[in-house]
Amino acid sequence: MSEQVERALASLVIETPSWGYGDSGTRFATFPQPGRPRDVFERVDDAAEVHRLTGTAGSVALHFPWDAVEDPAALREHIESRGLRVGAVNPNLFQDPDYKLGSIAHPEERVRRKAVDHLLECIEIARALGSTAQSLWLADGTNYPGQDDMIERRRRMVAALQEVYEALPDEQELLVEYKPFEPAFYASDLADWGSALLTCQKLGRRARVLVDLGHHAHGTNIEQIVGLLAEEDRLGGFHFNNRKYADDDLIVGSVNPFELFLIFVELTAPGRTMPRLTIDQAHNVEAKVEAMVLSVVNLQEAYAKALLVDRVALADAQRSGDVLGAHEALLDAFRTDVRSLLAAARAARGAAGDPVAALRGSGYVERARAQRGGT
Ligand code: RM4
Ligand code: MN
Ligand code: MN
């Protein structure tokens, strides 16, 4: 058992987001934290610390232009010198005032052109950094019925994405994220997994869907979506976070650990390959590095528990119509305390047995505060 968990951890790569280390807050206020990273290099340093403690966060996802630098080669070198890889490149099509009515679905050709040019630029940035994915989330949509023609918007969006897809080098894939609401509150242009999947099918095999756990209506069975997309070989990746109400971006597994476990049960089903596993969090009151460490540890726990599922017993119970026997096969795994197993597996990999305690005892946060300043 412990060997199985050790092997599994060795192959687990979780991407942490550069944007999860900087200052953030609520829609009402940003709360500056002392010791916050001042630039992308320091955000990478924080990501490296999370990896050092957990042993499975060896990749860092970047967001542009937030992480823009003069010299991408220097950034790549910094990332690699910290023992990390460059994860997905996330273009930003939602902050420029020109994007008020959308980006690639915008009614004006000039704005659509500008947005496509940014996407093409991000392909070049990814090439220079050695990244193998574009991870695209569109804020596009409308706020009122009649504001724009929904199907026209979709045509514009697809045409723009086709141009981008054609420019993708072989080693890059295009991950398409969906979200039902916010910032658009009437009709988002990529509102759900179905719209994202249809778009990917129009583009080609290297376009796949990205599932963000905060981007569903309440009651949606996310693990079913995961299984379905995996079955169609269109599951590109995840943005892990947790929520109680909307797109809350809370610590992974903090509110609904059972749902997280069930997602990993799908991901580890026989014959499946792991998609890209990225954390997408924007903390508002919690300490950033510690929050990220806790998210990675919670992901490790969900993963390890999913590996404990007795697949033979589960399949037998399912075949014989033993409703609760099948359900209990899952509960048995979910209820297993895997913490000491994981602590040992992490220690065997040179990471921390107890990553949160190790962070608190390391002085990392205090040193960052002294070196980086900030109030
Ligand atoms: C969105 C979405 C994107 C993330 C932005 C900042 O809600 O989750 O993935 O890049 O927030
Ligand atoms: Mn996301
Ligand atoms: Mn989100």
Image (cartoon, helix red, strand yellow):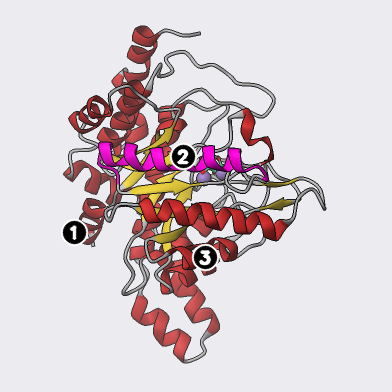
Dot 3 surroundings within 10 Å: few (below 14), some, or many (20 or more)?
Answer: many
User: Which callout, 3 or 2, points to the residue nearer the camera?
Assistant: 2
Q: Earlier in the sequence, mark 1 or mark 3?
A: 1
Q: Residue at x 53, y 46 (%)?
A: 137
Q: Looking at the picture, does residue 5 appear above or below residue 295?
A: below
Q: Residue at x 38, y 66 (%)?
A: 205
Amino acid marked by disc 2: Asp
C-alpha span from label 3 to label 2: 24 Å
Amino acid marked by disc 3: Leu
Residue occupied by mark 2: 117
Of residue 187 and residue 113, the one placed in the foreground of this image is: 113
Q: Is residue 130 magenta?
A: yes
Q: Earlier in the sequence, mark 3 or mark 2?
A: 2
Q: Which residues are magenta?
A: 107-131
Q: Quadrant of the N terminus?
A: bottom left
Task: Report the number of numbered marks.
Answer: 3
Q: Residue at x 54, y 67 (%)?
A: 198
